[in-house]
Structure formats: structure tokens, C-alpha cells
Image (cartoon, rainbow, N blue to C red):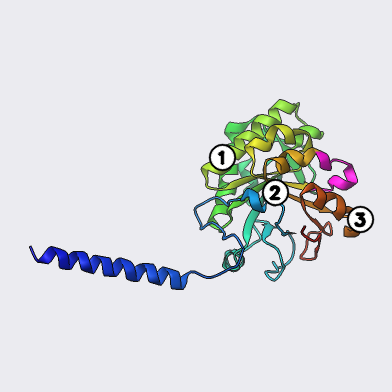
């Protein structure tokens, strides 16, 4: 009978010691929101939606010193060492996946049969995909998402998710694209990735409930910024970039809308000029 209290006391001492150790090991990062651990989708707290700084880099060695909370990167060229360093700095990592097009030099290009390849796409050497062929595209796109997850990304931005707006070589309609994009959002979540909508401005109002954030190119130049407000009104971040003009000119508009805005060169190297946060 006397053994049980001693065992209970030992367990209590061990639990107390473990709690103290966790407190000592937990780093203090001020107001920075911690990045979710691998295996969980990136959270986007509504209270922080207007306060992110971001970086979009697809060419050149990743610069981890950039003063940004969110990095949008290429999952193929970005190394696991680079993502590990960024995660150690508590950066949020978003991978850019081309879901509506394939390029001949893509590592998985041979997995897309000729029957789903259409006209020349937006990227040099790319072709649009027939997004109505979900059964054919889903396994390949799922593996693209898994590559992101395996390298430590917690979110995915869907590029070329607007083939219906272009001469894709297929009779794609608004509803075809809408269904495809919603399926992709569900696929991303099933793989523990937070889904983000890139461009596809005409469908923002319909798709904002399905996605956690938006990435937009040149809404100021194109006069489309107000159409992105469904994301802002839902407390979701809008990561916006302009390639021309001055931040002195467009930041007043976009920051006023609640966007995280930067100016970049079209080559998307490490250089950026960011709008000041409110």
C-alpha cells in the first residue's frame, strides 16, 4: 500500500520537470505568430490579416534575410535546406503550384497525356490543361502538393487556375473552372496544406469561402483591386504585387484596402520594395 503514493509522487515530479523544461526551451518571439509544425496547414489568424509582410521569389538563391513573414517559393527549385532555414526563422512558407498548365521541362510532364494538353499557356513552353479531366489530373496534382508538404511548406498557391479566361484549346466554361478550383482546395486541405487562390479575379466572390488567402498580380494596373475585397472582409490575407509604378503611388490604395503589397521585377528574384504596414 505504501508503494502507490511514492509512485504518484515520482510521476508528479517528472511532470513538473517536463513542464519546466518546455518553458525553458520555448523561445520568446514577441508578437510574431508561430508557424504551424510540419504536418499541419499554415494558419492565417484574422487579427493578423492586414499585418503580413511577404516575399515572392522564384529565381536565384532564396534570401532568408528578407524582412518578410510569408515566402512564396517554387517547390521544385527550393531546397529542403532553404525551407528548413526559413522555418527556423518562423517564416510562413507557401509553394506555388501550376495546376492548370504543364511545361515540357516539368519533372512530371510525362504523366500528362496528350489528350489533356491544349494550346500554348501563359508560361513560355507551357500548355493549358483540360481541367474537366479531374480523374486524370488529380493524381499528378496531388503529388505536386505532396512535394510541397514534404519540403516543409504549409500552404499552396494555385497558379494558372484561370484557363477558362484564355484560349486554352478547350471549351472551358466558368463553372468548369469553379468546380476544378474547389476540388483543388479540398485536395490541398486533405494533404494538410492551406489553399490560396492566385489571380482568377472574376471568381473571387464565389471562391473566397473555399480558400484561405489570395495572391494577386497587378490589380492596380488592371483596375481590379476592389474585386478582391471578399477575402479582406472575411479576415483573409491578400498578397498583392505590382511590376510597374511606384510604391509611393499604389501603396495608399492597396494598403487602404487591407492588402499586403509589394513591388517586384517580373523575373521574381530576391529584390522587392514593400509597402509599409498600417
| Residue 114 appears anywhere in the view | no
Element under disc 1: helix
- State the image quarter where residue 182 is shown: top right
- State the image quarter where residue 80 is shown: bottom right
User: In the rendering, at what x and y percent does residue 255 appear?
Assistant: 80, 52
Q: Which residue is mark 1?
A: 187
Q: Is residue 123 above or below residue 270?
A: above
Nearer to us: label 3 or label 1: 3
Whichever of labels 1 and 2 marks the residue nearer the N terminus, that label is: 1
Q: Residues within 10 Å of mark 3 (few under 14, many from 20)?
A: few
Magenta residues, start to end: 217-226
Whichever of labels 2 and 3 marks the residue nearer the N terminus, that label is: 2
| Residue 214 appears anywhere in the view | yes
Q: Which residue is mark 3?
A: 249
Element under disc 3: helix
In magenta stretch: residue 62? no
Whichever of labels 3 and 1 marks the residue nearer the N terminus, that label is: 1
Q: Nearer the viewer, residue 246 or 267?
A: 246
Q: Is residue 147 above or below residue 206?
A: below
In magenta stretch: residue 220? yes
Element under disc 2: loop
> How far is mark 1 from mark 2, CA to CA?
21 Å
Quadrant of image for the N terminus:
bottom left
Q: Which mark is residue 237?
A: 2
Residue for point 58% across, 51% down: 43
Q: Quick check: 212 left or right of 243?
A: left
> How far is mark 2 from mark 3, CA to CA?
21 Å
Residue for point 70% across, 71% down: 65
Q: Nearer the viewer, residue 79 or 125?
A: 79
Amino acid at each position: 500500500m505504501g508503494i502507490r503514493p511514492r509512485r504518484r509522487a515520482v510521476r508528479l515530479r517528472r511532470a513538473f520537470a517536463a513542464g519546466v523544461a518546455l518553458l525553458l526551451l520555448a523561445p520568446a518571439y514577441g508578437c510574431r505568430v508561430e508557424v504551424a509544425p510540419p504536418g499541419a496547414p499554415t494558419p492565417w489568424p484574422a487579427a493578423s490579416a492586414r499585418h503580413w509582410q511577404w516575399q515572392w521569389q522564384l529565381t536565384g538563391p532564396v534570401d532568408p534575410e528578407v524582412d518578410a513573414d510569408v515566402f512564396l517559393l517554387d517547390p521544385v527549385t527550393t531546397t529542403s535546406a532553404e525551407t528548413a532555414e526559413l522555418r527556423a526563422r518562423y517564416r510562413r512558407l507557401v509553394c506555388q503550384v501550376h495546376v492548370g498548365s504543364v511545361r515540357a521541362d516539368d519533372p512530371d510532364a510525362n504523366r500528362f497525356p496528350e489528350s489533356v494538353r491544349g494550346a500554348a499557356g501563359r508560361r513560355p513552353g507551357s500548355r493549358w490543361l483540360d481541367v474537366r479531366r479531374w480523374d486524370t489530373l488529380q493524381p499528378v496534382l496531388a503529388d505536386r502538393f505532396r512535394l510541397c508538404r514534404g519540403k516543409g511548406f504549409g500552404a499552396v498557391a494555385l497558379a494558372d487556375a484561370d484557363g477558362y479566361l484564355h484560349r486554352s484549346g478547350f471549351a472551358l466554361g466558368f463553372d468548369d473552372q469553379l468546380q476544378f478550383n474547389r476540388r483543388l482546395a479540398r485536395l490541398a486541405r486533405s494533404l494538410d496544406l492551406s489553399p490560396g487562390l492566385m489571380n482568377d479575379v472574376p471568381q473571387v466572390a464565389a471562391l473566397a469561402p473555399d480558400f484561405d488567402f489570395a495572391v494577386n498580380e497587378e490589380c492596380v494596373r488592371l483596375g481590379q483591386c476592389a474585386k478582391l475585397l471578399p477575402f479582406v472582409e472575411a479576415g483573409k490575407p491578400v498578397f498583392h504585387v505590382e511590376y510597374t509604378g511606384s510604391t509611393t503611388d499604389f501603396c495608399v490604395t492597396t494598403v487602404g484596402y487591407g492588402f499586403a503589397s509589394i513591388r517586384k521585377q517580373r523575373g521574381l528574384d530576391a529584390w522587392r520594395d514593400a509597402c509599409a504596414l498600417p
